[in-house]
Image (cartoon, grey):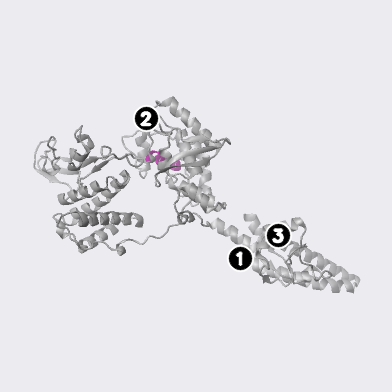
């Protein structure tokens, strides 16, 4: 076999000033490993030197898989891997210093080729490069035997200064820990066998509250979504109705929907995390919109394009908009309805760019007036699943809809918003039971004393009374049939009847006043106790309502 040619290290390449060709150069502090900036000491020219060896384009045309290991850039497609993520990355660039670390990392990732997905391999390399950066900054001449627990503690402190989210920093630590454990176990080197990482090195992750999009914001999206190009508008609707991940929507196949024998529609897709095919029930309206998108693809692209969503010309404008609104100065401005189809699968950053621009141009805000980040597409998934939970959907159905493997994951969506809490407490307060003394009493039969069950009882004419309820079951006989219900210990009332009690008291006081004027002593004796009971009932109910800071009628007006 032909001798494998090792790519020379770029540091040994001759560098010259592009203006005066002088080799008297000084490296700038803005350099990175693969892209070096220099200042010519002769003419003052500031220029960049970029190694050509870190591009798959410079690999030999007929390179064999087993030869790839000897190069400083790997084309994962040749190694049998599919491009990873919506960005379709497929290369690993080992622009790493020092050289001994680079060779160890290559050995480690070579062992993971058959085990990891492309995106996982890229993430491992990206995280380990952070360790390389730390060595370059703190100890450029570090040798394998110098890597000890003390040096690792310094690296952990370095990572903590980067203000990474706990999940991100823990991922970095895990990947570097796995790398060193592999080296200690499998490789012959001067690396220490001392334990380098401990469980306490990881940041404590606080379970964050699932953040769904407020109704106030969703209504604004509904109002302005027609400003979007049709493919982008459809992608947003799929996100909202199905709870799919944005990468799953971007990679939907052309024939992704099918109709069952009942005439209902299902959408088929690839679950990124579970790595399996799945399908979800969708509305007929969404299915029709997808059929329209299929016609759009057929009309504008060749039959070989097998995806539902393609990208657009001028996508760099939207891609740069997605990167914190930092526009590409070379990109021509595009309007929200601009979409010229090209034969490439759309990237998630393009979709985010459209939504970023929509939010800013149409001032989509939260209640405080701050621009709401609708471009964070995973919120649509949270909103869909939270909405299912809020409507009483069972955990099993939420798990199936979300593609969760455990109930704990789905339970994150079963939470109460502020509005949910207010609504529930209003229900509790309004269904508080008061006896004839105006005192709060516990329900005798809680399951039968909900507002819904009382309504059912009232509709059936069972054991209901004027302005209240009887706590006796309908199968029981009333032991005080000759007494007024309000004088019976089995009678209770709720805040729903507060106004009725006030009206009854007003009428009773009129009867008493009229009886006194006419000298009807019997009527006075009969109605005065009745009025006193009503006053106690009303006083107790109003005291309870005032303790909540708002009256019953005010609740109804604000609802």
Expressed as whole percent of the image width and height from the top left, the position of residue 183 reads: 21, 55
Q: Which residue is mark 3?
A: 454
**First along the sequence among labels 3 and 1:** 3
Q: Which residue is mark 2?
A: 343
Mark 2 element type: strand
Mark 3 element type: helix
- On the rendered image, what quadrant is the N terminus found in? top left
Kindly indicate the quadrant of the structure image that contains residue 423. bottom right
**First along the sequence among labels 3 and 2:** 2
Expressed as whole percent of the image width and height from the top left, the position of residue 433 reads: 68, 67
Q: Which residues are magenta?
A: 349-360
Instruction: Please identify the residue farthest to the front as the structure is shown.
Output: 1
Q: Is residue 354 magenta?
A: yes
- Whether pointer 3 and pointer 2 mark residues with C-beta atoms closer than 8 Å, the reply is no
Mark 2 Cα-neighbour bin, 10 Å: few <14, some 14–19, many ≥20: some
Mark 1 element type: loop
**First along the sequence among labels 1 and 2:** 2
512 sits left or right of 349 in the view: right
């Amino acid at each position: 076999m032909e001798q494998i040619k090792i790519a020379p290290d770029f540091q040994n390449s001759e560098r010259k000033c592009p203006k005066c060709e002088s080799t008297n150069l000084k490296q700038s502090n803005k350099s990175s490993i693969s892209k070096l900036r220099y200042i010519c000491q002769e003419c003052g020219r500031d220029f960049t030197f970029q190694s050509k060896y870190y591009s798959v384009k410079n690999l030999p045309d007929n390179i064999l898989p087993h030869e790839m290991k000897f190069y400083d850039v790997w084309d994962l497609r040749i190694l049998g891997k599919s491009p990873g993520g919506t960005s379709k990355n497929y290369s690993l660039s080992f622009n790493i210093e020092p050289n001994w670390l680079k060779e160890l990392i290559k050995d480690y990732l070579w062992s993971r080729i058959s085990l990891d997905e492309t995106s996982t391999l890229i993430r491992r390399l990206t995280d380990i490069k952070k360790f390389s950066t730390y060595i370059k900054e703190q100890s450029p001449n570090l040798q394998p035997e110098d890597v000890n627990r003390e040096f690792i503690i310094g690296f952990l402190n370095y990572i903590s200064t980067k203000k990474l989210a706990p999940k991100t920093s823990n991922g970095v630590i895990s990947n570097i820990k796995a790398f060193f454990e592999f080296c200690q176990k499998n490789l012959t080197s001067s690396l220490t066998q001392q334990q380098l990482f401990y469980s306490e090195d990881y940041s404590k992750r606080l379970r964050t509250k699932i953040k769904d999009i407020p109704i106030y914001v969703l209504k604004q999206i509904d109002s302005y979504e027609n400003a979007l190009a049709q493919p982008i508008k459809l992608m947003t609707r799929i996100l909202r109705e199905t709870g799919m991940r944005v990468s799953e929507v971007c990679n939907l196949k052309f024939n992704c929907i099918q109709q069952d024998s009942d005439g209902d529609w299902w959408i088929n897709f690839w679950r990124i995390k579970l790595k399996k095919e799945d399908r979800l029930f969708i509305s007929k309206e969404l299915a029709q919109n997808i059929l329209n998108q299929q016609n759009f693809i057929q009309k504008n692209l060749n039959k070989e394009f097998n995806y539902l969503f393609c990208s657009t010309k001028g996508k760099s404008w939207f891609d740069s908009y997605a990167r914190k609104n930092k526009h590409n100065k070379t990109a021509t401005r595009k309007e929200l309805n601009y979409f010229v189809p090209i034969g490439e699968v759309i990237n998630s950053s393009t979709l985010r760019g459209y939504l970023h621009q929509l939010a800013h141009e149409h001032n989509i805000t939260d209640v405080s007036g701050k621009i709401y980040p609708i471009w964070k597409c995973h919120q649509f998934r949270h909103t869909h699943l939270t909405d299912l939970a809020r409507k009483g959907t069972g955990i099993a159905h939420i798990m199936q809809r979300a593609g969760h493997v455990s109930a704990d994951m789905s339970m994150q969506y079963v939470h109460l918003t502020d509005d949910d809490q207010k609504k529930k407490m209003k229900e509790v307060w309004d269904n508080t039971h008061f006896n004839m003394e105006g005192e709060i009493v516990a329900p005798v039969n809680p399951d039968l004393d909900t507002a819904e069950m009382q309504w059912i009882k009232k509709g059936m004419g069972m054991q209901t009374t004027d302005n209240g309820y009887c706590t006796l079951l309908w199968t029981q006989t009333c032991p005080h049939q000759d007494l007024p219900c309000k004088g019976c210990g089995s009678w209770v009332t709720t805040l729903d009847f507060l106004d009725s009690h006030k009206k009854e008291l007003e009428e009773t006081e009129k009867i008493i006043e009229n009886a006194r004027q006419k000298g009807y002593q019997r009527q006075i004796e009969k109605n005065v106790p009745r009025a006193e009971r009503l006053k106690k009932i009303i006083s107790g109910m109003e005291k309870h309502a005032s303790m909540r800071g708002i009256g019953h009628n005010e609740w109804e007006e604000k609802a």
